């Protein structure tokens, strides 16, 4: 693991000054047209309410995608790493990936300075093989006021700061996963302006889930001017029971209710992928406490995770009562993340092909 400064990036502040919509309203459209094709590998995870599992789902998908790159590397195929970025100031992604309080944890200061002061972007390289992350934390809470000041001066182009930053580094990464909550409008706008595909984690009761989805659909509409490409690519259901390898009526009924809403909103039911993450709060919480994604936790629970330096097996994780984590449950959960990642990425690739096609037809 290494803290790497991605410097040599050109000024994002100059970009928003140059293309400020205060002078010519067409400037902003010109900027958006330039940025969009470079952001097609940016996937955002968000939903209209907090605590839906954004961080758990995003860090786990990032890990699964990084493992897939590792496998490609073994087969001698071309590879690129995955980048995980959390915009929220709770910085819980640090817990899920086990770097909270480590020497790499700057509470989001580096990201804040890169975003609002044009500094180089600090990336923790190799959090896991083929997985990099940008650390977030309490400094992320200062982003909204800085961006508000900029938007007072330069208008809504300022919400493209993150998009302009990611457009310069996206070619280095297979996928960039953005984890952001709807809590702060400024953060939410920057996140939505930067990604092309959205996944919406959904956990819990019908009404709350449906309400959250409605809010997200509204936000997507509101960001159109800054990002005409962003769309919900997949809903990711988390924490629903699975019996005999099938979802129970709790999930099938919820899916049907959401399906009707999707029909009304002219959104394809394809977003309702069949894979889902089963109910496993105990295992998920233990994995987070150990700073491990589900796949890694499953290996540890089975006594098969090896220390990278000594090659010795890592101690098997235990719960607060000293009992070993159940390896079968851990493996099932890890398998769910692989299935979800496979289906989500398939939809993302499909959409990207359509977007490329659109481009060609405009030429
Ligand atoms: N498989 C699962 N089954 C049930 N609950 C789960 C599962 N995985 C995670 N959880 C629970 O989901 C909760 C939400 O997790 P997470 O922090 O990922 O949400 P979030 O949307 O990022 O929250 P915030 O809005 O605070 O950033 C956690 O309390 C965790 O215990
Ligand atoms: Mg979170």
Image (cartoon, rainbow, N blue to C red):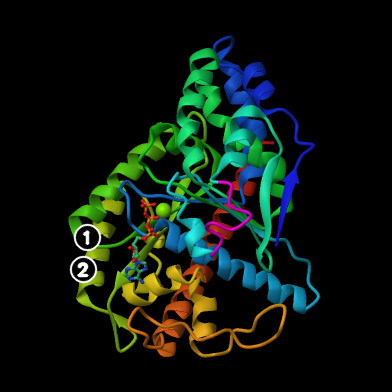
In the image, which disc is placed on residue 257?
1
Q: Secondary structure at mark 1?
A: helix
Taking the magenta stretch, the answer to whether it contains residue 99 is: yes
Verify CB contact (< 8 Å) between mark 2 and mark 1. Answer: yes
Residue 202 in the image, given as x and y percentages of width and height: 32, 59
Bounds of the magenta span? 98-106
Report the residue at 51% width, 17% height from top: 155
Instruction: Count neighbours of disc 1 (C-alpha within 10 A) and say few if under 14, some if 14 to 19, many if 20 or more.
Output: few
Quadrant of the rendered image containing residue 305: bottom right
Taking the magenta stretch, the answer to whether it contains residue 140 is: no
Ligand 1 is in which quadrant of the figure? bottom left
Report the residue at 42% width, 89% height from top: 328
Residue 97 in the image, given as x and y percentages of width and height: 54, 64
Instruction: Count neighbours of disc 2 (C-alpha within 10 A) and say few if under 14, some if 14 to 19, many if 20 or more.
Output: few
Indicate whether 152 appears above or below 177.
Answer: above
**Front-most of residues 111 and 261:** 111
Q: Is residue 361 visible?
A: no
Residue 242 in the image, given as x and y percentages of width and height: 30, 81
Quadrant of the rendered image containing residue 13: top right
Q: Is residue 356 left or right of residue 257?
A: right
Some atom of ligand 1 lies within 8 Å of the CB belonging to the residue at label 2: no
Report the residue at 59% width, 29% height from top: 116
> Label 2: which residue?
253
Indicate whether 97 appears above or below 196.
Answer: below
Q: Secondary structure at mark 2?
A: helix
């Amino acid at each position: 693991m290494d803290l790497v400064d991605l410097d040599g990036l050109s000024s994002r502040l100059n970009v928003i000054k140059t293309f400020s919509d205060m002078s010519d309203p067409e400037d902003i459209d010109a900027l958006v047209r330039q940025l969009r094709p470079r952001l097609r590998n940016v996937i955002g995870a968000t939903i209209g309410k907090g605590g839906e599992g954004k961080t758990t789902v995003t860090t786990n998908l990032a890990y699964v995608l990084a493992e897939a790159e590792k496998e490609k590397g073994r087969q001698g195929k071309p590879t690129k790493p995955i980048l995980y970025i959390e915009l929220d100031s709770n910085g819980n992604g640090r817990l899920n990936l086990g770097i909270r309080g480590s020497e790499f944890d700057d509470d989001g200061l580096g990201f804040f300075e890169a975003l609002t002061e044009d500094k180089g972007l600090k990336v923790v390289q190799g959090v896991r093989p083929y997985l990099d992350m940008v650390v977030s934390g309490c400094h992320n809470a200062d982003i909204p006021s800085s961006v508000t000041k900029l938007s007072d001066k330069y208008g809504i182009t300022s919400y493209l700061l993150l998009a302009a930053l990611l457009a310069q580094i996206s070619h280095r990464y297979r996928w960039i996963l953005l984890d952001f909550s709807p809590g702060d409008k400024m953060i939410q706008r920057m996140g939505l302006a930067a990604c092309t595909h959205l996944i919406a984690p959904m956990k819990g009761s019908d009404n709350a889930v449906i309400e959250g989805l409605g809010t997200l659909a509204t936000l997507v509409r509101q960001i159109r001017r800054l990002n005409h490409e962003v769309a919900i690519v997949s809903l990711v259901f988390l924490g629903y029971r699975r019996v005999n390898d099938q979802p129970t009526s709790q999930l099938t009924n919820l899916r049907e209710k959401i399906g009707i809403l999707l029909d009304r909103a002219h959104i394809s039911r394809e977003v309702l992928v069949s894979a889902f993450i089963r109910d496993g709060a105990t295992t998920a919480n233990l994995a987070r406490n150990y700073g491990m994604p589900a796949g890694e936790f499953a290996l540890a629970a089975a006594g098969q995770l090896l220390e990278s330096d000594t090659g010795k097996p890592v101690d098997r994780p235990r719960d607060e009562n000293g009992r070993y984590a159940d390896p079968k449950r851990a493996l099932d959960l890890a398998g769910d993340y692989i299935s979800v990642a496979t289906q989500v990425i398939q939809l993302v690739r499909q959409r990207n092909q359509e977007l490329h096609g659109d481009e060609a037809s405009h030429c």
